[in-house]
Amino acid sequence: AGGTGWGGNTGGRGGSGGGGGGGGEDSFNSGDGANPFGHNNTLKFAVGTAVTLALLTSNFHGKAEAKVVDVSSGTPEVPTDKVFIKSDGSQVGPILLTDVVGTPMLASLLLFFSKVLVCWCTDNSELATAGMDLGFLSFLGTFAFASIEKRYQAIQPAVLQVVVSHLILEYVFNGWLVNKIDPTTSCPPLSPEMQLHHVSSVIAGIFCLQTGGSNFAPDGLLLQGVRLCATEVTTALPVAFRQAARTKRLRGERIIFFGALMPLAFVWRSVWSLSVLRRYMELVDASGGIANVPSWWVGASSTAGVVACNLIWTWKILRGTVKVVKKMFGKKKGGKKNEGSDAKTENTEAEVDI
């Protein structure tokens, strides 16, 4: 969402909207203003995109012939060819546009063109982008939470279609287009963790949409997909943190606020996403185990990618918080004024793109 967490070493670029944080050894930005991914990391971007496209156009679910099961008498039984089946009883085959693409994606397209328009007309493209993404993702995360309830489950496919399309378009906008619109932007590039998060989330989302009507378990993959989307309700924290660091306001009560709330929020994100992965494997086991579900690895690996990102961010936030607490309580000698300055400086240098 264009924000930052505590810990890590990725700094933003300075621009018309204010100076970014200092780059560190893990920074994904080489400092080449014309190329947000640096010289060598352009290859990473290209490879990541190519792998994503290859996966999305492949057959996740094996090559068994499609079968139709009589569903007139109720829930169809799992067919003997042991693959996921849709609610109409047909086998899930290659990715179909009708399963993934839909009218809800217009919301992501509207956001994309709105960001292009606003960034074209403002001198602070980073704040404009972050603010628009924040509102969009906060709303989407809340809707994802709502769709967990049984009476709102009908909107689950719409939520996932919006998430998948938003992540793809954000990849394009943050990775390339914003720098064309505003060459002096301080909008941070996509870090390696963010690229892993986006690629994994897109694959997981499409996987859930493709098999979402499956009756292979009591609660299908659509539910687990929106549960993963619900973590976006924490978007405001990293966005606000980055703005506080950029405007040199990360001190006093703000340090206490972020130091208390961000670790809790990201520990929750990690635990929540881990529960999604655990539940997914339970659903696979309920279908007879991995031997009976040829496509189990797609859901497992993509969800594990999201879990890994949340764990990495949580670790960096906790590490940064501990450092700040040590400074505030004088474990590293220095005057009160210097401690506040050190804490602010350290966290500005310790920015990581969330």
Image (spheres, rainbow, N blue to C red):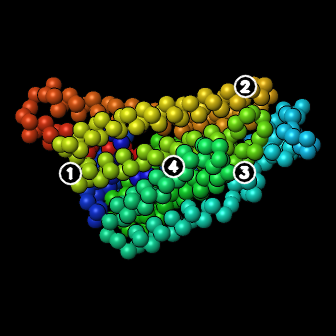
For the question of whether residue 29 can be seen, the reply is: no
- Compared to 64, does 54 lie above or below? below
Q: Give the amino acid at mark 2.
A: Asp
Mark 1 or 4, closer to the camera: 4
Mark 1 or 3, closer to the camera: 1
Q: CA distance from mark 1 to mark 2?
A: 51 Å
Q: Which residue is mark 4?
A: 141
Q: CA distance from mark 1 to mark 3?
A: 46 Å
Q: Which residue is mark 3?
A: 57
Q: Which residue is mark 2?
A: 285
Q: Is residue 328 left or right of residue 235?
A: left
**Nearest to N terminus: mark 2 or mark 3:** 3
Q: Give the amino acid at mark 1.
A: Lys
Q: Nearer the viewer, residue 103 or 10?
A: 103
Q: Which residue is mark 1?
A: 248
Q: CA distance from mark 2 to mark 3?
A: 27 Å
Q: Residue 144, image x and y in percent?
A: 56, 48
Secondary element at tag 3 = loop
Q: Residue 329, image x and y in percent?
A: 16, 28
